[in-house]
Image (tube, rainbow, N blue to C red):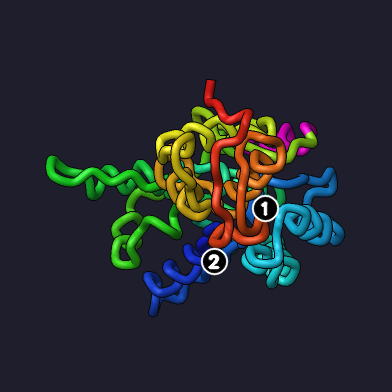
Amino acid sequence: MKTHVVFGETAEKKLEIALSPSPDSVIGLNDDLMAGPLAEDAFGPDVPVQRLRWWQTLSTGEDESHYVTGMTSNWQKFWTKILRLGAQDSLTVWVADNPTEYCGMLAVLAILSPQVPVAVIPVTSAYSAKFNNLHEKWTIKATGHDVRVDHYQALWDYAKPITASERERLQMNWRRLVQDHGEMRALVDGTVLTVPIDIWDHFIIRQAEKLGITHVTVPAVRLVGECLGFHSQWTDDLLVFWRIRHLATTGVFTYSGSLSDMRACILKAGPLATSE
């Protein structure tokens, strides 16, 4: 049986539509492994609970449902299916150039039976090779959010089998991340690295300055959108707003409205606002 793995609910739904009526199976992990703790027993029964608690410390009453709802059940469903795969199966992993999808791939390879043949579709480069031309240039940051449903099938031909040495390199990458005991990760030249949790802060401040925050007020939801649109790598709005809230509570920004809802939060430059 051929199984496709994607990361994020949107990618899972789109790929299921694109594959229909194929008998291939699609499974998706909704938890974003680029952020939060990675336990030594990476897939033990307590892990989804630990990660859920971490996300809840970042979340607010308005934005937590995206991660909280169904996280534990999705974890159990996803890893149960991965663990059941054997030599009679094959796995195709869809991975765009972002830390969320790379971390997901590393986690899958860490637990997958070595008997299961694995292929990877490098979504970002494959999409460019297939669809970029003199008149159109596409930069795919995330499989789910950026790839049209009717374009998925065109990317299947770009699947590349993972060699034994490459598989070992990726598994070592995962082990290093677990041993780092960090809470934020970034993709650098094809390798996922543990980075400080404030890695986005400088970029957020620069985007706020471009929106004129030193002269006018800026809605937090607009700043979040600017950060997602202009950063070279994909991340989630919840993580960006988490860092904005930190900047607002430490004097970089001041705010009116509510820090519990990015749509109700209005930002101004605070006494510490600078990108220098």
Specify the quadrant of the image occupied by residue 169: top right
Q: Is residue 89 left or right of residue 150?
A: right
Residue 62, given in percent of the width and then of the height, sits at 65, 66
Q: Nearer the viewer, mark 2 or mark 1?
A: 2
Can residue 169 be seen here? The reply is: no
Q: Which mark is residue 112?
A: 1
- Looking at the image, the residue that sits furthest to the front is 215
Label count reads 2
Residue at 62%, 30% (x, y): give it.
271
Can residue 203 be seen here? The reply is: yes
Q: Are marks 2 and 1 in contact (CB under 8 Å)?
A: no
- Looking at the image, the residue that sits furthest to the left is 134
Q: Is residue 113 above or below residue 261?
A: above
Q: Is residue 235 left or right of residue 50?
A: left
Residue 51, given in percent of the width and then of the height, sits at 77, 55
| Amino acid type assigned to the residue bearing label 2 in the image | Glu
